[in-house]
Amino acid sequence: MDKKLPLKSTEFKNPLIKGFLENEMNRELYKKAIYDFTEENKRLVEDAFAEYYERVRRTAYFSSMIKFMGIDFDKKLRKLNNRFMLTLDQPLKTETNEGSTMKDMLIDSAAPSLYEGDDTLSSKISDKKLCEALERLTPKQAIVLEMIYVKELSNKEIADIFQTSPQNISNTHKKALKKLKTLMEGDL
Amino acid sequence: MTKEDCCTKEIKEILVLFEPKIRKTLLQTAVQDREDLAQEMRLKLIEKYRNIQFNKAPKFWDLVNF
């Protein structure tokens, strides 16, 4: 801001005046009016200010109008969507399945299964003794071992399939290996 | 409203000026509804621009207390 402009500090703080004088042309008009304080010069500033004022008002008004139109529109849509819900989006009536909808019950038959593949753990192992030991594991242990070594899934992925924690899978894995080891040693 | 009424230079300027604001606001709406909303916003802009009357500006020399 030009230092020559005789403005008191309180007037500087008025954002309207500040914004108005930030414009080069308005500042010139203002300066002219200050140094040559005629009615004509005063009127010029007044007109420029009125125009500036209206532009600010209009911008503020339209900005908030657009903002609230967006919010209202979303509200309206949500209301309509709730009122005329698609069959698949409707919540299930059973109280036990809280939050689940009809579409959660659909099974995607085309989705790739994580179990796919012909190889099994025993088909990959040639050692007869180890095969026998494998058969003495619990089914869960056998499946976990197969997933880890044949399907090469991570603990996390296996945990997701069994709906348990990766730590649990890791435990099962460790126990299975330990059991295999003792079985192998015992037979020796 | 005839075509000449709503195609003035000022209205075009307003539409261009507020286009970014409209686009930004649209981001919160579902993709399939954005076009609808944008159209309504632009319509409203034109309508309001033509009809709205703001308060008279305060007198500059009153504000400045010269």
Image: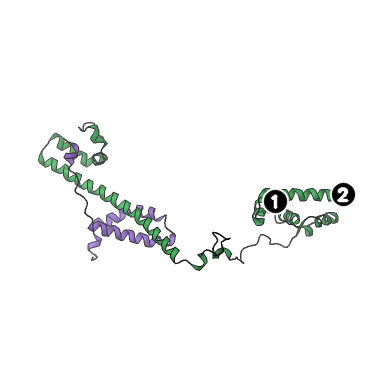
Q: Let me know if marks 1 and 2 both belong to one chain.
A: yes
Distance between the Cα atoms at labels 1 and 2?
A: 26 Å
Q: Is residue B62 left or right of residue A14?
A: left
Residue at 24%, 34% (x, y): give it: A10
- x, y percent for residue A16: 25, 41
Residue at 86%, 48% (x, y): give it: A185
Q: Is residue A105 left or right of residue A51?
A: right
- Amino acid type at circle 1 is Ile
> Residue A82 — which label?
none
Residue at 41%, 61% (x, y): give it: A77
- x, y percent for residue A61: 28, 51
- Amino acid type at circle 2 is Gly
Give the camera-side residue of B4 and A145: A145
Q: Is residue B19 visible?
A: no
Question: Decide: marks 1, 2 in contact (CB < 8 A)?
Answer: no
What is the letter of the green chain?
Answer: A
Chain for numbered disc 1: A
Number of numbered markers: 2
What is the letter of the purple chain?
Answer: B
Q: Describe the element under mark 2 as helix, strand or loop.
A: helix
Give the camera-side residue of A159 and A109: A159
Q: Is residue A16 left or right of residue A168?
A: left
Establish if A181 lies above or below A79.
above
Q: Earlier in the sequence, mark 1 or mark 2?
A: 1
Q: Describe the element under mark 1 as helix, strand or loop.
A: helix
> Residue A186 — which label?
2
Disc 1 crowd rating (10 Å Cα; few below 14, some 14-19, many 20+) is many
Task: Name the residue carrying label 1.
Answer: A169
Q: Quadrant of the C terminus of chain B?
A: top left
Q: Quadrant of the N terminus of chain B?
A: bottom left
What is the residue that sits farthest to the bottom in this orientation?
A87
